[in-house]
Amino acid sequence: MAVSFSNDIQPLFSQFKGQMMWRFDLTNYDHVKANAALILSRINDPGYQMPPPPMDPLTPDQIQLFQQWINDDFPL
Ligand code: HEM
């Protein structure tokens, strides 16, 4: 299944948008693309987890979806 920003990534991040607006807009394609490597590292790192504890981390499937979006060269 092809991954896209509008169908997969924006819905995944939208509930967290307000709490990250100080740094970037998690629902904005250009912002997420520009920060993709940093975002990937933070959703994967239990020591510096985003979303932060006590919130639940993203699931392995959700993290894989974001990884696939990067691998596929950021489809809109
Ligand atoms: C999936 C959702 C989220 C993603 C992808 C995300 C991503 C990130 C990234 C990439 C950074 C590092 C920014 C930098 O170093 O310049 C960061 C920092 C931060 N985020 Fe988030 N964030 C998410 C959710 C949240 C939520 C829900 C909150 C608040 C409840 C939050 C609060 C913070 C704070 C306070 C920092 C700065 C302190 C730190 O680096 O740990 N984030 N986030």
Image (cartoon, rainbow, N blue to C red):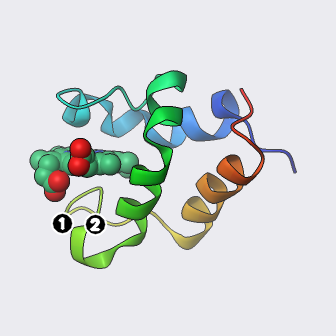
In the rendered image, the vertical position of residue 38 relative to residue 33, given as above or below: below
The residue tagged 1 is 53
The image quarter in which residue 73 lies: top right
| Residue 15 in the image, given as x and y percentages of width and height | 36, 37
| Residue 7 in the image, given as x and y percentages of width and height | 69, 33
Residue 49, labelled with which disc? 2
Q: Image point 40% across, 32% down: which residue?
A: 26
Q: Image point 41% across, 51% down: which residue?
A: 39
Indicate the secondary structure of the residue bearing disc 1: loop
The residue type indicated by label 1 comes to Pro
Q: Quadrant where the C terminus lies?
A: top right
Q: In this image, 46 relative to 29: left or right?
A: left
Residue at the bottom extreme, as displayed:
46
Residue 8, labelled with which disc? none
Query: Mark 2 Cα within 10 Å, few/some/many (few <14, many 20+)?
Result: some
The residue type indicated by label 2 comes to Gln
Labels 2 & 1 near each other (Cβ < 8 A): yes
Q: Image point 30% across, 29% down: which residue?
A: 24
